[in-house]
Image (cartoon, rainbow, N blue to C red):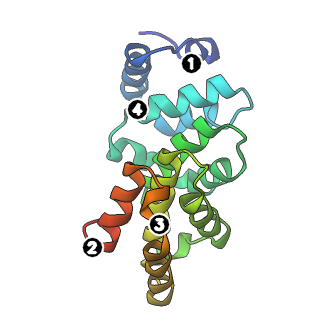
Amino acid sequence: MMEINTAIIRAVKNEVDAQAVYREVKRSGDFLGFARQFMLGDEERVVRNAFWVLTKATDKELSQLQVMLNELIEMALKTPWSSVRRLSLNIIERLEMKKDDLRTDFLDFCLEHMADVDELPGIQSISMKLAYRMCKFYPELLAEFKATLESMEPEFFKPAVNCVRNRILNGKLK
C-alpha cells in the first residue's frame, strides 16, 4: 500500500498512474481528505493530477465532496489553468446541485464560457450543462437560457458543444 503524498501526485503521468492513485484513495475511503490535501493547492501539476485522479471515482464516492461544492466552484471561477478549470467543472457537474446552491456568479461564469467561441469545447460543454441545471430551478431563467441556446450559431461551435446544445433543446439532457 503506497502512502499518497505530493511527490506521488506530481509524478502521475498517464492513465495507469492515475488509476493506481485512485485505487489507493478508494482503499482509504477518504476522498474528501484527498481533495482537501491536494486539490486546493497552488502547484498546477499537483492540483491538475489530483482532479484527474478523482475523475476516476464513482458518483457515490464523489458525493463525499458535496461539502466542498463552494470551494470547487471558487476553484473553477478563479483558476488560471484551463485544464484545472475543465476538471473542476467535471467534478462539480457530477455533484448534486440544489436550488439553494445557485450562485449567480457561477451561473454568469457558465453562461459566459459556454458561449465563448475561443473557449475549449470541454469547458463550453460542461458550462452549458451546469448552466442548464441551475436554470431549471427557475422557469423564467430556463426560458432565457433556451433562447440563448437557440441564438447560438452552430457553425461557430465544435460538434461536442453542438451535441450538448441540441440535447438540451430537444429535452434529452436530464
Q: Which mark is residue 29?
A: 4
| Residue 67 x, y percent position in the rendering | 54, 54
Disc ID at residue 171: 2
- Disc 1 residue type (three-letter): Ile
Residue placed under numbered mark 1 in the picture: 9
**Which residue, given by chain and number where applicable, does mark 3 sit on?**
153
Quote the CA–CA distance across marks 4 and 2. Answer: 36 Å
Amino acid at pointer 3: Glu
Do residues under tags 1 and 2 come within 8 Å of each other at their CB atoms?
no
Give the mark, 4 or 2, whose residue is nearer the N terminus.
4
Residue at the limit of the structure toward the front, as seen here: 155
SS assignment at label 4: loop
Residue placed most toward the observer, 166 or 2: 166
Q: CA distance from mark 2 to mark 3?
A: 19 Å
Q: Which mark is residue 85?
A: none
Q: Which quarter of the picture shows residue 111?
A: bottom right
The 10 Å Cα crowd at callout 2, few under 14, some 14 to 19, many 20 or more, is few
Q: Mark 2 or mark 3: which is in front?
A: 3
Judge the density around disc 1: few (<14), some (14-19), many (≥20) Cα neighbours within 10 Å.
many
Q: Residue at x 52, y 40 (%)?
A: 87
Earlier in the chain: of badge 4 and badge 1, it is 1
Q: CA distance from mark 1 to mark 2?
A: 40 Å
